[in-house]
Amino acid sequence: MKIHEYQGRELLASAGIPVPAGRMVQTIEEAETAASDILKGGAKQVVIKAQVHAGGRGKAGFVKLVKTAEEARAAAQFMLTHKMVSPQTGPEGLDVKRLLVAAAVDIAKEYYLAITVDRANNTNTLIASAEGGVEIEAVAAKNPDAIKKVRLHPHLGLQPFQARDLAFALGFKGKQINQAVNVMQRLAKVFVDSDASLAEINPLVVTPPNAANPDGEVLAIDAKFNFDDNALFRQKK
């Protein structure tokens, strides 16, 4: 079973993983209001993202950065009145009925982070790469050494030393390290607690340094979850 990105972000936030402010909307008017509220909250830009179970949204024109509520309204009007067509949808495309309206953040570096069921080794495995923001399959084909894998203990889960070693291997520095370790451990916990078969953050980003965060902030700005259908009886939510 799959869920939409906005639901995945809510799941991450409930697990204590830092996620930029955002909300799901279903109408043009709601999108305009949400964008206005986010901009008033201090965001410089807002991202509008179609909520569909298919990739290629950006290239299809269904992920847009806007600077005003009026631009958000125009973006929402386009997305809610056109089918999204990408290589993953086929020529028939998909209707868009929900949008995610979220605060856009400045990005200094992107990473890939996911936990999945590794059936070949009978473990849950953390997969990470310093080359985030693109399909992990493309990274594997181009530069397989860029992908790091950590097997989780079946009872103890992801250990702090494993997360720290991985954070160093990925190139996190200074206060970024503890932030990255926190995200990894919380992702590992929510993966088990929700009976997920995939929990993916792509990208996990570091923002540029500022006075409040001299090493930048580590944030999850996209989320993808798949769940084990056999466990749905104990996952009513």
Image (tube, grey):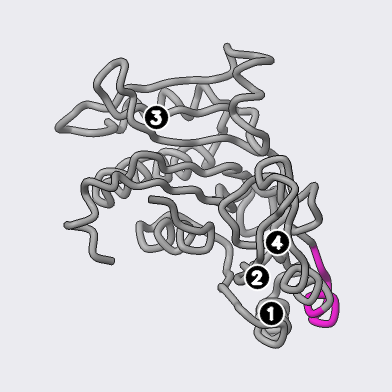
Of helix, strand and loop, which one carries label 3?
strand
Q: Which residue is mark 1?
A: 31
**Image: magenta residue range:** 65-73
Q: Which residue is mark 3?
A: 126
Location of residue 58 in the rendering, given as x and y in whole percent from the top left corner: 76, 50
Location of residue 194 in the rendering, given as x and y in whole percent from the top left corner: 28, 51
Mark sitting earlier along the chain (4/1): 1
Q: Label 3 vs label 4: CA separation?
A: 27 Å
Q: Amino acid at mark 4?
A: Ala
Q: Identify the image quadrant of the C terminus.
A: bottom left
Q: Which residue is mark 2?
A: 101
Location of residue 105 in the rendering, given as x and y in whole percent from the top left corner: 69, 57
CA neighbours of label 2 inside 10 A, class few (<14), some (14 to 19), many (20+) = many
Q: Label 3 vs label 2: CA separation?
A: 29 Å
Tell me whether the residue at label 4 lies in contact with that at label 1, contact meaning CB atoms closer than 8 angstroms: no
Of helix, strand and loop, which one carries label 2?
strand
Q: Residue at x 56, y 52 (%)?
A: 53
CA neighbours of label 3 inside 10 A, class few (<14), some (14 to 19), many (20+) = many
Which residue is at the front of the view, 179 or 1? 1
Task: Report which quarter residue 48 is drawn in.
Answer: bottom right
Q: Residue at x 38, y 33 (%)?
A: 116
Q: Amino acid at mark 2?
A: Val
Q: Is residue 236 left or right of residue 31?
A: left
Q: Which mark is residue 104?
A: 4
